[in-house]
Image (cartoon, rainbow, N blue to C red):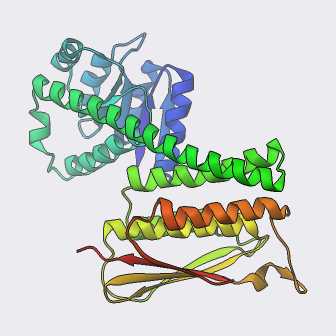
Amino acid sequence: MNICLLEPELEHLEKCKNILTQAFPEDNIICTSYPEQVTDIIAENEVAVLISEYNLDIMTVEEIFDLLTISSPDTVLLLMTEINYAEDLVSVYNLTEFYEIVLKPLNFNEDLVEPVQRAIAEHEKRKLGKGDIGEHERTAQQYIKEYDELKKEKSKRIKDFSFIYLIFSGMVEANVIEYSKKYKHSDTDIMHIKRHANRLFKEYIDVFVFGNKTYDGYMELLSGYFDDKAKGCKIDVTNGFESKFSDSLIKQLYYFLYVVGSYARFMYSVYDVKVTVLDGGDKYIIKAENNEEAAKIGNDIIYAQEDKGIRTVIYKMTKNILQNAFLKDMKGYEETKDSVVIMLGKDN
């Protein structure tokens, strides 16, 4: 499937291209900063979605959209804009039809990815001759309402993100300062620890605040992050029950595995983490075991992080995150030398 992006600003073009390439790896992302090239691109390729910046130079976006409505009616048109006034939005809509607005600036990848996902679904409907007629009968007032709601939602998400980040950063800062005094870490070591913690935080935000993936989707992500065939590193996950995961459990399970995987990768030169998920009646039992033999040469473990003090800080931070910070439905936590077991409550 072809997705075309028209953005005269090269820096923003590259940013959007990277987002789309990561989100739609199986699709062909065609990018241009020249409006006059768009008609040729669509003439030579079956373009499912066109994302166009509003402010163009040689041609207007209204002219491009009008041409494509005639020449390529199955192409779904997304308008990317920084328009700040409802009157301007009415003017645009009165001159041309577009499927949805992508509001700039893009604060999160989802601000671009989710409208494109909806546009792809609409393209499939149009190809089957079952286009959603209601979408094409929207009034300018409906677009204004949706535009205002989008602005409010973006503002709320940014505030939520900032609030959680402040809390987490404070927790990390306090722990790092405490342990760095004890182990006399250098500034470089401290930055190393903070980067590790911030990766855990970012993944938490991506999963719990913005994530909307299936179990298979998250497990594929996990494999992509942590499986390294060249080094023999891997995480294997086995389900031990038939019932379907809830969305809440999927996210908590994935994040637990991500934290454990991050700890193993940080700690050991080679890791072999095996995870089993069992039905424990009123709770799910999730056990992660790392085969330390995989990281041994002779009888000695070869650590990826040689500094014992840093390993200790990362270990305590990981334990703190699992026990206190993020897994809100946890009903129990057990730990041995080689394994971690958590128990998560089932949804009522």
**Could you say where residue 320 lies in the image, as x and y percent from the top left?**
57, 63
Compared across the picture, whether 158 is left or right of 79 comes to right
- Residue 108 appears in the rendering: no
Residue at the image position 52 percent from the left and 54 percent from the top: 203
Asked if residue 127 is positioned above or below residue 96 in the image, the reply reads below
Residue at the image position 84 percent from the left and 61 percent from the top: 307
- Residue 154 appears in the rendering: yes
Quadrant of the image containing the C terminus: bottom left
Asked if residue 262 is positioned above or below residue 241 in the image, the reply reads above
**Could you say where residue 82 lies in the image, as x and y percent from the top left?**
36, 20
Asked if residue 227 is positioned above or below residue 31 in the image, the reply reads below
**Could you say where residue 133 lies in the image, as x and y percent from the top left?**
10, 41
Which quadrant of the figure has residue 158? top left
**Could you say where residue 319 lies in the image, as x and y percent from the top left?**
59, 67
- Foreground residue among 214 and 9: 214
Residue at the image position 77 percent from the left and 51 percent from the top: 180
Compared across the picture, whether 57 is left or right of 123 comes to right
Which quadrant of the figure has residue 57? top left
Q: Residue furthest right?
A: 298
Which quadrant of the figure has residue 191? top right
Q: How many marks?
A: 0
- Foreground residue among 80 and 129: 80
